[in-house]
Amino acid sequence: MIKPTKLMYSFVRPALFSLDPERAHDLTMSSLRKASKVPFLTAQISRMYGNCVPDLPVRCMGIDFKHPVGLAAGLDKDARALPAFSALGFSGVEMGTVTPKPQPGNDKPRMFRLVEDQALINRMGFNSSGVDAFLANITKTEKTAVAGINIGKNAVTPIEDAHFDYVSAMQRVYSQADYIAVNISSPNTKSLRELQSEASLDELLMKLKTAQKKCEKVHKRYVPIALKVAPDLGSHEIEVISELVLSHQFDAVIASNTTVTRPDSLKSKHAQEGGGLSGEPVKELATECIRQFYKALNGRAQIIGVGGINNADDAWDKMLAGADYVQIYSQFIYNGPGMIGDIVKGLKAKVHAQGFKDLPTALEALRKK
Ligand SMILES: Cc1cc2nc3c(=O)[nH]c(=O)nc-3n(C[C@H](O)[C@H](O)[C@H](O)COP(=O)(O)O)c2cc1C
């Protein structure tokens, strides 16, 4: 029998999908923002969704998460709705990407649904209300889930000066973050991915680590940093990035962002739109990226796995490949919030079916095989 909460999304989805994707996104975010401000509403959402998600504790970057499923960056760019996303069941919400100054992003249309492919293409280009507005929102917000803050650079900042933007964004958001994600892998900001090259990355990570140490002293709190990478890296690039992540003592890698590749299998008429492709077609690419980072990092930095996760099997594959925590975006749009509980329940069943007491123990044993 179909559960009432799933039944509800089966009515909501056609209504949302009848709208332009960005309009549907804005409408959803404005409802979730309103709900976030009314404790009675968040309590009702929790009763329907969040409370149905079992605990399955994991530790990642020194942070204890109730369970291993979080919301990926890009949905709540301006920190408007953490309480609602938490009530829907996510154990962590990565907000942003936030840029130091407000900017509109690329021209519309810039978000496309590839329904036949269970995918999205976006070329949003870091539309952001800027760090001041972001902070005004988040400081008023009750942190009912782990708060990740994803930072980026403004489009007008030359790529050689990108570190100024990242450092200033880090300094501004530090006190509000449980962890900070450094996004150098969006394909929609000119030259951004060049920051993944050895010399640029070495300089950027060094400057960010120095800034983190200063912030730690000022705020008397260590906030871990993660580097968000593209799934389109070659093996050598993965080795180089891993070395830099380790030598600059970053805490984690988030693998991965959207892909600029276009598999031949795509059926949708939007398949050749410019931008980053996410959802089902990026799934295997992201898992392979995690596998290679896991080998190169060798347990010395952790991995957050993201890309095309649709169910517990997909999350499990990412975790066996090396992820200690996973995030979802595209399939959340296709399936709605009921999928969070399904994934966590499915993972829990896998752990118990194989006779392990908890998820970290299961992963440690199974990854060795
Ligand atoms: C519309 C859209 C906007 C996104 N914006 C961001 C962003 O601002 N920062 C970021 O790091 N990732 C962003 N992403 C990438 C997602 O966080 C995620 O890494 C990617 O979509 C792969 O996961 P998925 O297949 O579950 O969607 C965005 C993705 C989509 C679809």
Image (cartoon, grey):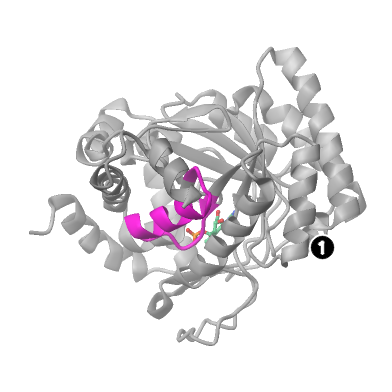
Q: Is residue 314 magenta?
A: yes
The amino acid on which the numbered mark 1 sits, given as a three-letter code, is: Ser
| Left or right, 121 with reference to 51 | right
Q: Determine the residue located farthest toward the left in the rendered image.
A: 1
Nearest the viewer among 16 and 65 is 65
Mark 1 lies on residue: 191
What's the residue at 80%, 38% (across, down)?
247
308 lies above or below 261: above
Q: Which residues are magenta?
A: 305-325
Residue 250 shows in the view: yes
Nearest the viewer among 78 and 162 is 162
What's the residue at 49%, 84% (across, down)?
266
Nearest the viewer among 225 and 47 is 225
Ligand 1 image-quadrant field: bottom right
Label 1 neighbourhood size at 10 Å, few (<14), some (14-19), many (20+)? some
**Quadrant showing the N terminus:** bottom left
